[in-house]
Image (cartoon, grey):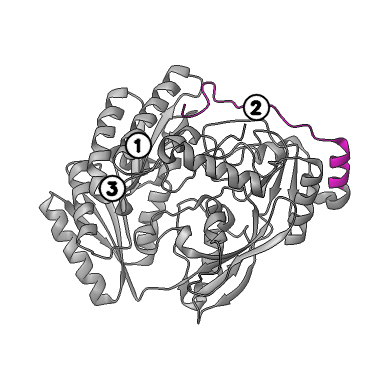
Amino acid sequence: MNAPTSPHILAAAQRPIPDAFMAALSARFGSQCVTSQAVREQHGRDEGSITAPPPAAVVYAESTQDVQDAVTLCHQYEVPVIAYGAGSSLEGHLLAVQGGISIDVGRMNRVLSIDTEDLTITVQPGITRKQLNEAIKDTGFFFPIDPGADASIGGMASTRASGTNAVRYGTMRENVLALEVVTANGQVIRTGNRAKKSAAGYDLTRLMVGSEGTLGIFTEISLRIYPLPEAVSAAICSFPTIEAAVRTVIETIQMGIPIARVELIDVNAVRMVNAYSKLDLREEPMLLMEFHGSPTGVKEQAEMVQELASEHGGNAFEWAERPEDRTRLFTARHNAYFAAVSSVPGCRCITTDTCVPISRLADALLQCVTEADASGIPYFLVGHVGDGNFHFGYLIDPDNDAQRSQAEQLNHQLVQRAIALGGTCTGEHGIGVHKQGFLLEEAGEGAVAMMRAIKQALDPKNILNPGKIFQLG
């Protein structure tokens, strides 16, 4: 079983919300506690295709103490609590599937400290990646993790996000050094430190990163930052086929060329992006690439990739060295999801998020393209293919149960193929609600049982984002 079946509306048993709890919440938070229908609905949905009833209330936290007090009340009354950042997740992470309240940390968006000598920064969870980089742009450093959406740093850490720069800079797993966390009983703990390495006990930071709000709510996050590269160059290259583009990527990575970004866009996505972003890109499969380093190093990297691309029929190599031109290209790539959704009015998008070893990328992709073409469902394909991660987006009529079922079947076939090739059902989006069946297929019953045991030990009342990653009952 992959995901909830049509009509894709979750109506699990809602836990009772005691009147005494709501009174205590209102007394503690006053105007920071909102129960209006519009605000509750905004905090009860994400960018995915699953819907559920909204939370009973939204608390706008402004400090660690606010989060601690709200969670303590939830623990006392056994009320579910869900952390909310920017609302950009795709797998139902924010849904109040068992009721409860949402804690919005968007007002906790400050940079707390910057230490350029140690290449670290500490921030609150509500700051978005764009806000973070704007805040440190004058220091000569940047934070590279770029999932496309202007997600909150807390949400990115919770889902172990990555994105376009991961091929060079890694994912949130490698770039989160330490956390301040409010646990299920309202206690505040700290995990990790700013040292480059540590062997002190269990690695609680790695446990929390990717836990999707089921083990704690982050209130401070320490991150690695990187010097801005001396030179940056971007290029696009069109190919006669997806296979030709993918083979170019595989050889680039296997040769050890330190490319910073390499994004695949299929012809459907190019067409949608052209219409949405008013561009005139060649409507063929395309790679968007970026190179970071010294001027000489960037030039050498680019020339090597251009030579590889030419061997696979790559043509129309176009360079973008001015910052505004690079921004225009990658903004168009980041807007591919919204371009696709706008191309079919009224549609919902079922997204995939598989990742495979780089040597198996072509094997994973090409059969999936054949299956998607045969289905007749409008779709697009994009991918952070430098690390073997790619996304199909199936654009379905939300009222067409047969079409939804067909899209889910395509997704299931794709995931099973990726797992068989040594890959994963989710490279960066997380499990949430949508991929729970896939987690069992990938990790096995023993590993999922261990995850459940950790959850039950740290959150015995099951109040922290219940119903996500796996079911406890």
**Which residue lies under the disc numbered 3?**
281
What residue appears at the point 61 percent right and 37 percent down from the top-left corner? 45
The boundaries of the magenta stretch are: 1-26
The residue beneath circle 2 is 12
Q: Which residue is mark 1?
A: 380
Q: Residue at x 19, y 49 (%)?
A: 247
Disc nearest the viewer among 1 and 3: 1
Q: Is residue 228 left or right of residue 58?
A: left
Task: Tell which of 16 and 139 is nearer to you.
Answer: 16
Q: Is residue 309 above or below residue 131?
A: above
Counting residues from the start of the chain, the first of labels 3 and 2 encountered is 2
Task: Give the camera-side residue of 211 and 414.
Answer: 211
How would you rate the neighbour count of disc 1 (Cα within 10 Å): few for under 14, some for 14-19, many for 20 or more? many
Q: Which quadrant holds residue 318?
A: bottom left
Indicate whether 330 appears above or below 177. above
Q: Is residue 11 magenta?
A: yes
- Residue 207 painted magenta: no
